[in-house]
Image (tube, helix red, strand yellow):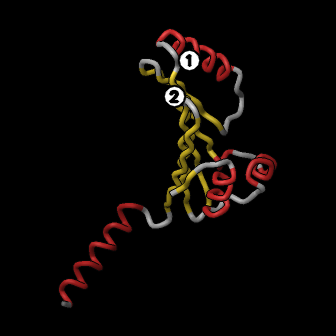
Amino acid sequence: MKKKIVMMSCLFMTLLVLTGCGSKKLVCTLTEEGSSLKAVTEFKDKKAVTTTVETTEEAASEEEAKQLKETYDAMLGLMTDESVTMEVKVNGKKVTLIATLNIGKMTDEDLQEEFNGDISYDAMKKYYEADGYTCK
């Protein structure tokens, strides 16, 4: 019995070291007509550090998907916010926009405006659920 407890303790400690004690993820999804959204927020020391949102839409044709990508690319070229990086991918008729928000690069004013200054796990979960997301 003692051997099992010691082995389980060693396994648990190994998992903690490998996964990082202070890191945690919140995964939220939202499905609407013709599109799906997935938001993954990573936390360190109980505060959000990055949020990546993937939006996938299905166009009526591959040509329309290419045109949608060109539109997104043009919009991305106008962005100057250093805290946000964006990428657009096309796979057949599916267009995916991937936006990553580096919360550490946001100003205090932006944090206050966007998240009411609270970037804890519980606050971020409430933020997404208020927009209709389902979070795990």
Secondary structure state at the residue bearing disc 2: strand
Q: Residue at x 71, y 33 (%)?
A: 81
Percent x, y of residue 26: 53, 55
Please say if the residues under marks 1 and 2 sit with CB atoms less than 8 Å apart: no
**Left or right of 100: which side holds 118?**
right
Q: Nearer the viewer, residue 8 or 129?
A: 129
The three-letter amino acid code for the residue at tag 2 is Thr
Q: Is residue 6 above or below residue 130?
A: below
At horizontal 67% and vertical 20% (from top left) the residue drawn is 75
Of mark 1 and mark 2, the one earlier in the sequence is: 1
Q: Quadrant of residue 74?
A: top right
Q: Viewer-proximal residue, 20 or 24?
A: 24
What is the CA distance from the residue labelled 1 to the residue labelled 2? 9 Å
Residue occupying image coordinates x 55% and y 29%: 34
Location of mark 1 (residue): 69
Residue 18's place in the image compared with 106, above or below, is below
The numbered disc on residue 96 is: 2
18 vs 108, left or right, is left
Mark identifier at residue 85: none
Quadrant of the drawing holding the N terminus:
bottom left
Residue 82 to residue 105: above or below = above
* Residue ranking furthest to the front: 33
User: Of residues 27 and 110, which is closer to you in this image?
Assistant: 27
User: Dot 1, how many residues are within 10 Å of its Cα: few (below 14), some (14-19), or many (20+)?
Assistant: many
Return the x and y of residue 56 as percentages of the image width and height: 52, 31
Element at label 1: helix
Give the total number of marks visible in the rendering. 2
The 10 Å Cα crowd at callout 2, few under 14, some 14 to 19, many 20 or more, is many
Q: Amino acid at mark 1?
A: Lys
- Please tell me which residue is depicted at 45% across the width and 67% down the height of the picture: 21
Q: Position of residue 85 (x, y in %)?
A: 60, 33
